[in-house]
Amino acid sequence: MDFTGQTVVVTGAASGIGKGTALAFLARGAKVALMDINEAGLDDVVNENQSKAEKLLKLPTDITNSGAVDDSIAKLIEWSGQIDILVNSAGLYVQSMVTDMTDSFWDKTMKINLYGSFYCCRSVAKEMIKKKYGRIINFGSIAGQRGSMANAHYTTTKRGIEGFSRSLALELAPHNINVNCIAPGIILTPIFSEEILKERGDVWLQTVPKGRFGTPEDIANGVMFLCSKYADYITGFTLDINGGMYIR
């Protein structure tokens, strides 16, 4: 798959799935805007890819601030003149039982996972409508599909993102803009600490028919497909990438 001539913006690009997805697009010829609140992490991504630095744009952004998101998208348009693809991979995953959860922690999870995706979609969609073309990928989760212990706040946001994406797909289809979701299973990224994996990893692994946890590259492969010409007639869809966890 070749994305030469296209411009992609990836949120959460400083690490994990976002970083893996950004690098996959870069390797396939795209210009990539890296959006994350972690500016040091963005610096690392650019420094690790100096040979293609001219195709990378750092956008340090707090996605819970709608004005900051709009400002970053304006910088992207000034840099490239267009936005073809948005990948909303930024998210917060910190476990808590409902009875222990504070109002502020619930609100923080909503702001990052749900509001952040909304703010980015709204800002980018306005530009895509002008061009009559676009691909938007949002991130649900297997947890959002079937529930997860100590994750009521997280699963609420992920289920909400799926519904939001389907509604947005209806709104944007007349403008040749596809909106799809990816629902990962357990992907080895920094959000799964050594402590969590030590405590639950063996039990979780038994639920994966493929016999291994996923990698950011596994998710990036799904993103590449949904943003390619081969998925031109797919919108409002959720792609499960979980090694078979959902069926087990």
Image (cartoon, rainbow, N blue to C red):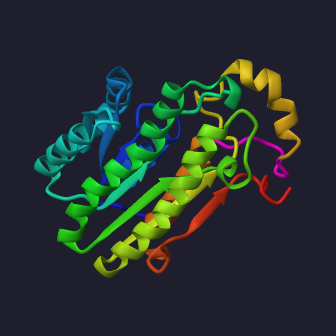
Residue displayed at 56% across by 24% down: 102
Q: Is residue 83 left or right of residue 186?
A: left
223 and 245: which is toward the camera: 245
Magenta stretch, main secondary structure, is loop
From the viewer's perspective, is residue 73 above or below residue 68?
Answer: below
89 and 224: which is toward the camera: 89
65 and 138: which is toward the camera: 65
Q: Is residue 41 left or right of residue 55?
A: right
Q: Is residue 26 left or right of residue 16?
A: left
228 and 132: which is toward the camera: 132
Location of the N terminus by quadrant is bottom left
Residue displayed at 52% across by 28% down: 103
Residue 86 position in % (x across, y down): 36, 55
Q: Is residue 48 left or right of residue 95?
A: left
Q: Quadrant of residue 116?
A: top left
Residue 125 position in % (x across, y down): 28, 62
Q: Which residues are magenta?
A: 208-215
From the viewer's perspective, is residue 25 above or below residue 136?
Answer: above
Residue 248 position in % (x across, y down): 86, 55
How many marks on residues? 0
Residue 107: tell me if it is visible: yes
Residue displayed at 57% across by 49% down: 158
Magenta stretch contains residue 212: yes
Magenta stretch contains residue 184: no
Residue 228: tell me if it is visible: no
Residue 202 position in % (x across, y down): 86, 31
